[in-house]
Amino acid sequence: MILLQEMKELNVQLEDMNVHVKGHLKIGLPQIIGTFFFPKVAKTFSKKYTEVTLEIVEEGGLSIEKLVEKGEVDAAFVVLPTRSKELEEQLIFEAPFVACLPKDHVLKDEKQITLGQLQQDNWIMFDTTFALRQVVLESCRKEQFEPKIAYNTTQWDLLMALIRDGLGVAIVPNPLTEMNGQNLCVKKISSQYIPWKIGIVVKINSYKTHALRAFLKIV
């Protein structure tokens, strides 16, 4: 398997000897991150490098990391830090998590809250393939409780809709509430700072084509 991967990389290097930037890139894109970053990046890149095609590979963040490790995806946007020692990471964006509550929640008049104040609530969580889920669980454990999970979803707009209809609470990256936080109660978290760190990753020590290096520069 390793030999096949090395032969594949050698073929890519031989094809890439021409410094003219062209080719095909597979970019891993978890559902939530893609909404914020990829359209602007793709527009800028495609305008400058017209002979490079971009293929989007959509999976949950943890699944995307595995695809980069295997060399099946050239680069990916992921939540940092990753759990892999085989990936080279570069931070590109950071924003805080906030608490998202139904508008009639008992804490609606508080300026900010702790996660511990939500331990008796039902929680709406991202699916197990999402790196965001691990961030949420670890943050709750820091305040000595396990959230009571009522629903799991891969769709951030559905997550928001479930909160809006009073079916639970969640903590989410603040940019999500800026896009789809209407008729919700959004609170700052006072008990800890929970960062949503977004980065671009590639496989460590793998050959970077001219096209890939150009894409990373644009990012």
Image (cartoon, helix red, strand yellow):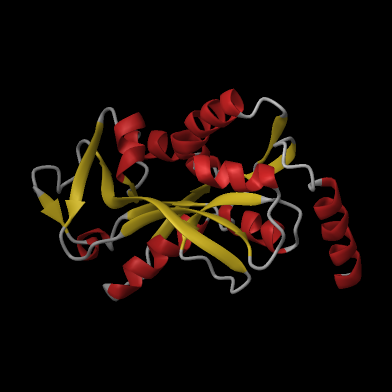
> Can you say which quadrant of the picture contains the N terminus?
bottom right
User: Percent position (x, y) of residue 70?
Assistant: 75, 62
How many marks on residues?
0
Foreground residue, 201 or 173? Answer: 201
Horizontal arrangement in the rendering, residue 163 relative to residue 28 (left or right) = left
**In this rendering, does residue 104 appear at all?**
yes
Horizontal arrangement in the rendering, residue 20 relative to residue 132 (left or right) = right
Considering only vertical position in the picture, is 137 above or below 173? Answer: below
**What's the residue at 70%, 32% (across, down)?**
52
Considering only vertical position in the picture, is 123 above or below 49? Answer: below
Horizontal arrangement in the rendering, residue 168 relative to residue 185 (left or right) = right
Foreground residue, 190 or 102? Answer: 190
User: Percent position (x, y) of residue 44?
Assistant: 52, 28
**What's the residue at 85%, 46% (across, down)?**
15
Considering only vertical position in the picture, is 11 above or below 206? Answer: above
Say which quarter of the image contains residue 100.
top left
Considering only vertical position in the picture, is 143 above or below 153? Answer: below
Foreground residue, 126 or 88? Answer: 88
Horizontal arrangement in the rendering, residue 107 relative to residue 15 (left or right) = left
**In this rendering, does residue 158 appear at all?**
no
User: Percent position (x, y) of residue 54?
Assistant: 68, 34
Foreground residue, 174 or 140? Answer: 174
User: Percent position (x, y) of residue 101?
Assistant: 26, 44
